């Protein structure tokens, strides 16, 4: 779905304020009290639990991707991921990560190529579909062979077709680094994920 910028209401013009006399310096405006925050500030003594860390990291808004590859038998594998980031412009490198417990990990660990499909806002249902386990995820969506035959999704905000160059274990995830070989983008508004919910791009500030 395409997002449009909401119309900004027209504010009435306020009458000008009278000038401040030279003999009296202008007073500082009163400080408004800060609204009560439901979040308790952390301290060095507060443990960083997985639940608290997940909640805090969820405040960082991200795009949403479907990362695809072919397994050793040539079968298409894909999953929804927002753990995607730029790494280097020269050389052109990107990275993403996958849980070590993911059943898709062996396929991506053995794959020589992967494709990062950056989803558009109107591809929300595909994001939900690929976030679940299923045998026929690719039955929905406009898919075609991309680099090395890896599935590439049409209608995305951007697509990065990569050669896998590095992987390493970090905590409970595997990091994948890829060199971008083919790049495409479109004017479609991207899908956004924040605090456990999907969002549109919203108004440009």
Image (cartoon, grey):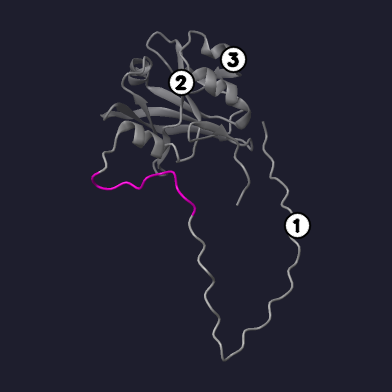
Residue 63: x and y in percent read 51, 35
3 or 2: tag closer to the N-terminus: 2
Q: Residue at x 37, y 20 (%)?
A: 108
**Of 104 and 51, which appears nearest the observer?**
51
Q: Is residue 88 magenta?
A: no
Between 41 and 177, the one lying in front of the other is 41
The reply to whether discs 1 and 3 touch (Cβ–Cβ < 8 Å) is no
Q: Secondary structure at mark 1?
A: loop
Q: Mark 1: give few (<14), some (14-19) or many (20+) Cα within 10 Å.
A: few
Label 2: how many Cα within 10 Å (few below 14, some 14–19, many 20+):
many
Residue 92 visible in the picture: no
Q: Which residue is mark 2?
A: 79
Q: Quadrant of residue 173?
A: top left
Circle on res. 10: 1
Chain part drawn in magenta: 35-45
Q: Earlier in the sequence, mark 1 or mark 3?
A: 1
Q: In the image, which disc is placed on residue 140?
A: 3
């Amino acid at each position: 779905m395409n997002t449009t910028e909401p119309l900004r209401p027209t504010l009435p013009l306020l009458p000008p304020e009278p000038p401040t006399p030279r003999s009296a310096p202008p007073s500082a405006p009163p400080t408004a009290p800060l609204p009560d925050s439901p979040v308790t500030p952390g301290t060095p003594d507060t443990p960083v639990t997985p639940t608290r860390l997940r909640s805090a990291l969820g405040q960082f808004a991200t795009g949403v991707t479907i990362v695809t590859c072919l397994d050793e038998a040539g079968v298409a594998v894909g999953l929804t991921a927002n753990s995607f980031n730029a790494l280097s412009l020269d050389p052109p490198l990107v990275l993403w990560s996958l849980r070590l417990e993911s059943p898709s990990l062996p396929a991506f660990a053995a794959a020589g190529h992967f494709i990062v499909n950056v989803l558009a806002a109107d591809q929300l249902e595909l994001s939900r579909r690929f976030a679940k386990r299923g045998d026929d995820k690719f039955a929905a969506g406009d898919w075609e062979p991309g680099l090395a035959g890896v599935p590439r999704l049409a209608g995305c905000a951007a697509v990065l077709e990569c050669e896998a160059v590095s992987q390493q274990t970090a905590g409970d995830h595997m990091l994948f680094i890829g060199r971008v070989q083919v790049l495409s983008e479109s004017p479609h508004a991207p899908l956004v994920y924040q605090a456990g919910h999907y969002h549109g791009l919203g108004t440009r500030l």
